Structures are given as structure tokens and as C-alpha cells.
Image (cartoon, coloured by chain):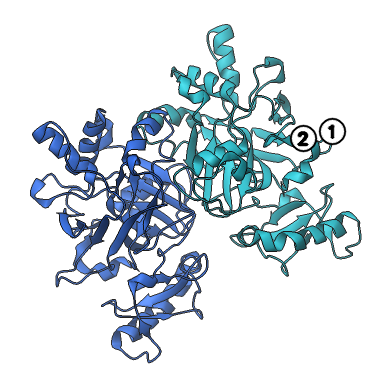
Chain colours: A blue, B cyan
Amino acid sequence: MKLASLKHGRDGRLVVVSRDLSRCIAVPQIAATMQAALDDWANVVIHLRDVSDALNAGTLADAQPFDPADCAAPLPRAYQWVDGSAYLNHVELVRKARGAEMPPSFYTDPLMYQGGSDDMLGARDPITIRDEAWGTDLEAEVAVITDDVPIGVTPVQAASHIRLVMLVNDVSLRNLIPNELAKGFGFVLSKPASAFSPVAVTPDELEGHWHDNRLHLPLRTWINDIWLGEPNAGEEMTFSHADLIAHLARTRKLGAGSIVGSGTISNKDRSRGSCCLAEVRMIETIDDGAPTTPFLKAGDTVKIDMWDAKGQSIFGSIEQTVRLS
Amino acid sequence: MKLASLKHGRDGRLVVVSRDLSRCIAVPQIAATMQAALDDWANVVIHLRDVSDALNAGTLADAQPFDPADCAAPLPRAYQWVDGSAYLNHVELVRKARGAEMPPSFYTDPLMYQGGSDDMLGARDPITIRDEAWGTDLEAEVAVITDDVPIGVTPVQAASHIRLVMLVNDVSLRNLIPNELAKGFGFVLSKPASAFSPVAVTPDELEGHWHDNRLHLPLRTWINDIWLGEPNAGEEMTFSHADLIAHLARTRKLGAGSIVGSGTISNKDRSRGSCCLAEVRMIETIDDGAPTTPFLKAGDTVKIDMWDAKGQSIFGSIEQTVRLS
């Protein structure tokens, strides 16, 4: 099942989207918003699936064309956004780029940060920055949305609370990060609003590609329509999505609609490219002594997509243009 | 004007509360929830004030008795909770307790962290912990709630977006903090759910005590009914509430209902006591070589309150008991 939030007020209008992303239908009789669906997931999911089945069978005469440009983020504002760093190849490279060491505990104790969730961008919304010198970067990731997660869940229990999967562009202001992290309290200024794929999908929709609580497909990125990378999101994910949720729930319960990100997808095989410019610049530094690829400038475009085995987009693509405010 | 959210579903039932905290009345014809009121503040505030005036004049026959035990947090779940560290005396002492240095930039560049906001505790809800060894501590603070704040506001502009003021207990798991902050990405496990005062009040309700975007009254704390402190929340606040909002909005706009905390209130005058146990323990270490005051244990109680010039509670008191889950 695929779900989206069309732009409408602060919380969007929940729609069920066809598997091929061509059509959609609002479901106010079931749930008016994505948050309302997540708040009562156990009761509404059966009804949403009935609509989804009819939509995919082509038997819903009142279905509308689906346009990703009409989409807000699946949760246009959320009660929680926490991002992990589950791909340790990325963590190693970014740490090297910052001149920071990689503690051995990072292989057993997940690194996560609490992000802002009051303003989530739709897939085609611009990345609005006030200063190009801040060093704007993309971070292409996979994220999951949970329902209510009790305190102290195990990873096995956490897995049963993963209700939806989507893509994220975790926009990062690289040149603000060193000073901010040096203050010791994590990211505040250096992580502005993130953007999300047009649709969020239930794990069963991912067919055989979702196993071990990881999504085993390449995440594809382009800058200004030039290929940047396609690392596989599954095989080198040290901590699974369930591991990340269980870590987060160690000291507190999580409310329905909590979004938990994977961190930037990254593979050791350099031929697969990268999902962020910081990684490209680090590799340039290692190879050539200095980075040559610039961070994003006004007018630059970012595209993030994931395809199924037939080459069809699963979530719709994130396509953003950088804009100076 | 004083507002509260009575426990009701996930988002509470908005009530207007009388100045003396004795009576309240639901206002579904204006806004069903606190978030709904904040989403449309410019339009609803006049109507809420009319109800407040009638309630305080004693002319509302259908007003109900107000009981803080019925209260959820003013925002039972919020789209953003960011906490500052505006009292540098506290920051200095806590840093010393952790063996960390105080960078000079801390006097010009506010220290803030992004907190979890999916689960906000009511004023009489228990502090639920899984392990006493985590070192549970209170942090008594003042917080403000904003409406929509544009990106790049000045402190003067930010001040006009402060809609409500309340008290917070920013519960902290002290013994988890050193390891978590050493990872470099801020607090995740070491800051479980925070608790808020029964009512949130508009700044004008604070009379002459609210000026320079600071609340100039003592914040009073007790542990197991034993006095812990009453530092003044105004005079030694290095960064005002407006300064904190402007800092946060430097790279992004803030959504309506963003909660911005002051950080633990702290004064240099030791006779005023403390608003957290970490500070008590640090002073013991300086004076006696080692801390003797333990962190909170199951069954311990915390009380946080602020009185007006007549000794009347302004926000109602936060009164919590520590409970093992």
C-alpha cells in the first residue's frame, strides 16, 4: 500500500496512491490526514488496504491523477524526527573530513540525533537557504514511520512498529556543523528542514527487497541531472531500522508518527558513488589532497529516487532546487 | 490569559483557566485543542480573551472546577521542543561536573539542543524510568510557545512571536549524558519526556515581571518537600527568550507550537539554591571533594512552582513522583 499527503492546510490531505503512482484517492471517511491514520493504525489499515486494492484493480471511478508536485511530505509536520548513522562507511568518511576520530563503540552503540520536525518539505519543494557559504549538502536516506512504540522494546518488537517506509533528503549545512558540534549539544542550525519522497509505503509493498528490517535496493542520486551515486541501502547497514528504533526507545516510549532515519546511505565500493557531497569531497581529499566538488549553490538541483526490479520508481522521486531566501 | 489542556485523547481538550486557577471552561467553539489555537492564533486570541474576561469576572455559569491533576501538558505532543542553556552559571557548573571546559563563545553564541516532543508529560504525571542507575535529575526551567516564526527573524521580531509562557521539568538522565555527548550528536537517550506546568499564560498575564523578554521571578523547587532552590529566572539570563528564538530561526522557520526552553535556572548567589541536583552535587564537589546528594530514586517527589507578588501560583505547580517501569 502506498500513501501520500497532498498539500492542504498544515497537515495535508491523506490519499491512497496506486502502485504505479499514476492515480490517487482521498479517504476522509477513513482518515483525513496521515497523522490521523497513524494514531489509529490498527483500526484503519484494513480499510485503507481495501481502497488500495480497489485502486490498483482500476475499479475506483473517482480516482484522480497523482502528481508528485502536489505532495507535501507524508507527514508535513511530525511529532518526532530522529536520524541515525547506520552506514558506518559514511560515518568514517565524514568524521575523517571533520578531522574527528571514529570510536570503536560506534560499531555497537548506534549514533543518532534528534532533528526538528515542525517543518517537513514536500518532494518538489525548494531547499531555501539564506547563505551559500553555509555549504548546503544533500543526504539521501531511507526513513521509517512508527506507530506507538512502548519503552524498552527489543529490536524484534520494534520491527512490528514499522508501519511505513519513505525516502529522505536530510539537508545539511556542512560549514555550520563543525562549530555547532563543537558546542557539544548536537545539530540545531546545521540541519534545516528535510524533504521526503512523495509517497510512503508499507513494508510489504517492497516485496522481497525488505528483509532483516533493511531495504535492499540502490538509492539513486543526481545533482543537476549528473549521476552522483547508487549505493545499496541494505547490505552495509550496520544497524537495521528496528535496531535504531529499539535504541531510541531504551529510555522512553515513542509516539505514533515518529520518523526514524537511517543516515546517509554509503557503500565501501566507490564505483557506486555517494549520497552526499561531503563524501565526494572526502574521497577527493584522500585521492588528491583537497576537495574540488563544491557544495550546492542557488539553482542547483537534487534528485533522489529508488527503483524496483522493473526500473519503476517505488516512492516517487525527490526533486529539489536550491533557492536563496 | 491562562490556558490549559485537560487530559482527553492524544491532544487534550483546550480550556481557559481563571487567573486564580480555581475554574476553567472548554472552548470547542473557538479551538478544540491548544495546537489548533496556536495554528490560528491571530484569529482566535480575541475570542479566547473574551472568555477569559468573563471567566475572571465570574459571569460564566457553566465554568468547572480546575484541577491540575486533570491536566495534560499544555501541548501534550508538540512539533518542536528546543531547549537553550541561557543561564551560564548553570552551564559552567555542569561543565565542571563533567570535566569539560567552558568555551568563551558560549557568552555570545547560545547553546541549544533539539529535544523529543512526541510525548510531553502533564504536571502531575510520574517520571517513569527503567533504571535508577541512570541518575535521574530534574531541571526546572521557563519555556515559551511560539506561533509561526519566519526564517531569519531578529530578536525584536522574535519577541512578537512569543504567545505563551510555562514552566518545564526537563528530566535528565545524568549518568547517560557523558557517553551520549561524547558521541558528538547531542542528547537522545539521556533526555526522556519533559513535564510542563498545568497552565500556559500569555506574557501580559505576568504583569511587570515579564520584561526584556525574561521572566523576573524566582523559580521554586523542592525534592521530597525539602526546599532545593529559588533562583530568579530573569536577572542572570544571558540570552533572552527572544534571543533563543532568533538563534534557532537563523537557518529555518519555526512552526506554530514550537516550544523553546530557557535551560536550567541558575544564579551565582548560592543562598538561592538550585533547580537541579547536578548543580547541588557540583557545589558539594567543589566544597567537600565529592558529591553526597543522590540523584532521584523511585518514590522521590519533585515540586516546581512560581509565585506572583502575592504568593499565588501563576502556572500551577509541577508535582511529580519517580516511578520504576
Q: Quadrant of residue B241?
A: top right
Q: Earlier in the sequence, mark 2 or mark 1?
A: 2
Residue A27 tag number:
none
Instruction: Please give the chain letter of the residue carrying mark 1.
Output: B
Mark 1: few, some, or many residues within 10 Å (few <14, many ≥20)? few
Disc 2 or disc 1, which is closer to the eye?
2
Is A310 on the left-hand or right-hand side of A248? left
Mark 2 secondary-structure assignment: helix
Q: Which residue is mark 1?
A: B309
Instruction: Please give the chain letter of the residue carrying mark 2.
Output: B
Is residue B242 positioned above or below A20 on the image?
above
Is residue A149 positioned above or below A22 on the image?
above
Cα–Cα gap, marks 2 and 1 = 9 Å
Label 2 with label 1: CB-CB less than 8 Å: yes
Is A14 on the left-hand or right-hand side of A95? right
- The N terminus of chain A appears in which quarter of the rendering? bottom left
Q: Which residue is mark 2?
A: B209
Is B233 on the left-hand or right-hand side of A219? right
Instruction: Name the residue at 80% across, 36% down.
Output: B208
Name the amino acid type tagged 1: Ala
Name the amino acid type tagged 2: His
